[in-house]
Amino acid sequence: AQKITQTQPGMFVQEKEAVTLDCTYDTSDPSYGLFWYKQPSSGEMIFLIYQGSYDQQNATEGRYSLNFQKARKSANLVISASQLGDSAMYFCAMREGPRGTGNQFYFGTGTSLTVIP
Amino acid sequence: DAGITQSPRHKVTETGTPVTLRCHQTENHRYMYWYRQDPGHGLRLIHYSYGVKDTDKGEVSDGYSVSRSKTEDFLLTLESATSSQTSVYFCAISVSRDRENTGELFFGEGSRLTVL
C-alpha cells in the first residue's frame, strides 16, 4: 500500500484565490511527522510546513496551512491568496516514528500547481 | 543553511560504466539520504545512513551501493549504470532548524544523471 497518496496530478488556481492540495497517508505508527515541500521549475526542494502526529493544532506558516484530519489520515495543504510564484510541484511526505530514530521518509507523487493571472 | 553540496550536478554516461555521486555536508548531521526523482513516482529512497559506516537500504536500492567513511560525505555508486537509472538524484539530511523536533529533510541541489 502507498504510504503517501496525492490524487491530484495537476491543479489550477486563479491568482489571489485559495487552493487546497490533497494528501492522505497510511501508517500504523502512533508517532509520525507530515511535511510539505515545494519544487519550483528550478528543481530545488523547499520545505514548507510540518505537522506532528501529536500536535493538537493545525500547522501554519504564513500563507500555508496544513489541514490535519488524523482520523481520516489526511494532511491537506492550503495555500491562501495564491501568487504567480506559487506555481510549482508540491510534494507531501511522511516520517514514520519519532524524530531521531533513523526514520525513512516517504513521498507522494506530487501535485503540479499552476497559478493563473 | 545546512550546507549540502552534491557533485557532479550533471553527468552523461554510457550503459555499463560506473558512476559515483557525492554528497558533502558541513554541519555534522547524523542522518543522510539518497533519493531519486522520476516523473510519476515522486521521490523514492535509495539508501540512507545513520552514521559513519552505518547504512541501510531504501525501497529502490537494487543496482546502487553507498558508503559513508566520514560524517560529512555520503557516496552513491552505480556499479554498472543502466538506462533505467537515468534520473535526478537528491541527497538530503535530517535537520531541525527553526522549529523544535521537526526533523525535516533538507535537500541538496540535485544531480541529473543521463545514462545512454
Image (cartoon, grey):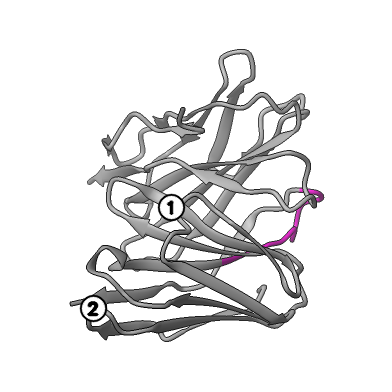
Q: Is residue B98 magenta?
A: yes
In the rendered image, the residue lying farthest to the left is B116
Is the stretch drawn in magenta largely helix, strand or loop? Answer: loop
Residue B92: quarter of image: bottom right
Stretch in magenta: B92-101
At which x and y percent is residue B114? 25, 75
Read off the chain for label 1.
B
Numbered badge on residue B62: none
Numbered badge on residue B43: 1
Element marked by disc 1: strand
Within 10 Å of disc 2 (Cα), the crowding (few <14, some 14-19, many 20+) is some
Residue A82 against residue A28 in the figure, above or below: below
The answer to whether mark 2 and mark 1 are in CB contact below 8 A is: no
At which x and y percent is residue B13? 26, 84
Q: Is residue A55 magenta?
A: no
Q: Tell me what residue is drawn at x 56 percent, y 14 percent.
A: A72
Q: Nearer the viewer, residue A35 or B34?
A: B34
Q: Is residue B33 left or right of residue A102?
A: left
Q: Is residue B36 left or right of residue A104?
A: left
Numbered badge on residue B15: 2
